[in-house]
Amino acid sequence: MVRQELLARSPHVREGNFTRIAASDLRLLFELYDRRVFAGALSRALGELDGLGLGFRLSRRMTRAGGKTYFRPTPGPDRPRYEIVISSHLLFSNFQGPNRPVTVNGLRCRDRLDALLRIFEHELVHLIELLTAGMSSCRAEPFRELARGLFGHTDVTHRMEIPDQRALRTHGLRVGDRVSFVFQGIRRKGRINRITKRATVLVEDPSGAPYSDGKRYLKFYVPLQHLERAEGREEP
Ligand SMILES: [Zn+2]
């Protein structure tokens, strides 16, 4: 129902595996859920109809969580009191052609739009808890009961592929691997410290910043395809 209405009304989300989305689509989604599922109770609880106390944002940098809901006791002009953020990175990096089955909150998602709706529903439960109790935790039982009762969620996590898993699948690389790469004509050796869209590689160097192991490292952000596996994995 919400799915069909969003497809009919959004200027960007025109198909199940949509290729464009804007923050305005998240606001539209909120209005649809508020009306269809909550008979307007959410916007009434927010104490307004123009929705200024509730902001929506898409994040390309959120690479692990599907969504997040923020509560700020002291809001500002660009910082709404409540804010729902959805990871466009995860949505768009998944559902690219044939893939392993994706579940979000325990429910099978046939396409990108299904995943968006399940993530958004989870964030709505956070919003409800924040509005009613001032705090929210999806690890606690009350959250799980509410999510199950309202949306049939049987779990509170997503099984979309995150950057670490993709790096392992496509390039056989993981955090801790020793790698080498060429930067400004010089081959450097280091260790993968983090993987987001690129790998963060720490290279031991006297001019680098001090780290907790007492050594100094320079930090490089390297596209995965430019990395070569060096000998040995995870140093002690
Ligand atoms: Zn959560």
Image: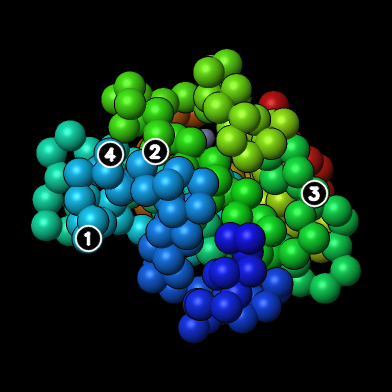
Per the image, label 1 sits on a secondary structure element best described as: loop
Query: What residue would you read off at disc 2?
Result: 127
In three-dimensional space, the C-alpha distance between marks 4 and 2, rounded to whole angstroms, equals 10 Å
The answer, for residue 8, to whether it is visible in the render is: yes
Q: Residue furthest top?
A: 141
Query: What residue would you read off at disc 1?
Result: 50
Q: 232 left or right of 72?
A: right
Query: What residue would you read off at disc 4?
Result: 45
Q: Nearer the viewer, residue 175 or 56?
A: 56
Q: Nearer the viewer, residue 154 or 100?
A: 154
Viewer-nearest of labels 1 and 2? 1
Q: 229 left or right of 74?
A: right
Q: Position of residue 113 (x, y in %)?
A: 65, 64
Q: Are marks 4 and 3 in contact (CB under 8 Å)?
A: no
Query: What residue would you read off at disc 3?
Result: 108
The amino acid at mark 3 is Arg
Count of picture labels: 4
